[in-house]
Amino acid sequence: MTEARSEQRDAPARSVGRPRQSKQALLDAAAAVFVRSGVDAPVREIAARAGVGVGTIYRHFPTRAELVVAVYRHQVEACADAGPQLLAQSSTPEAALREWVALFADFLVTKHGLAGALHGDGAEADALHTYFVDRLVPVCGSLLEAALESRHAVSHVDAYNVLKGIGNLCIGAANDTRYEAATLVQLLISGVLARGDE
């Protein structure tokens, strides 16, 4: 028993020198693996991409559902954070809006399996949908408002419906290589902005 305790005390010392992976790096690795291999990808594949042991993944996320939820939230946050950054860095508010909706469409097309993986838990799926809407509608609203203001126009379409429209345009895009969701999303934005000019 004392030997086992001694080994446990020594275990952290053996890992000294190995780069520590942050939770964010684990989530980035999991997101990339989910896009490539789906949400049912083996945990060892995620661990290999992150450069950690499988145990590290399970220490942070004891169940697959917890990992899927965390990745989904992480991706929503990345999409939300991109809005203000693009608005500050882009040449025009319209350019920022267009780049952000392209990111949003990519998120929908490549990450749609994340929400689907939680279909069995209605409460969890509802909570994620509410989180998604509460987090991303205001970001879209700010970008849309800035783009319309730069054109001295007023919106006839609210941010929620713009995001819902983008979502509808992205349905099925992952299953049809000829379907160009990104092009249709930009046409939707052109229409929204043109209506604002009327």
Image (cartoon, rainbow, N blue to C red):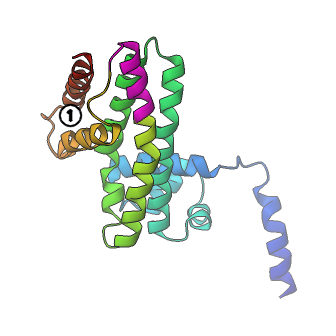
Question: Image quadrant for the N terminus?
Answer: bottom right
Is 78 drawn above or below residue 18 in the view shown?
Answer: above
Helix, strand or loop at mark 1: helix
* Amino acid at dot 1: Ala
Name the residue at 80% across, 73% down.
8
Residue 96 is situated, as x and y percent measured from the top left of the image, at 42, 21
Taking the magenta stretch, the answer to whether it contains residue 92 is no
Relative to 1, residue 174 above or below: above
Question: Is 28 left or right of 189, judged from the image as shown?
Answer: right
- Residue at 83% x, 80% y is 5
Q: Residue at x 79, y 53 (%)?
A: 16
Q: Position of residue 134 (x, y in %)?
A: 44, 50
Q: Is residue 195 left or right of residue 45?
A: left
* Location of the C terminus (image quadrant): top left
Is 143 a magenta residue?
yes
Name the residue: 49% across, 61% down: 67
Between residue 90 and residue 52, name the one nearer to us.
90
Give the residues drawn in magenta, as a range. Answer: 141-153
Q: Residue 7's x, y, as percent? A: 81, 74
Residue 114 drawn above or below residue 110: below
- The residue nearer to you, when weighing 17 against 89, is 89
Residue placed under numbered mark 1 in the picture = 181
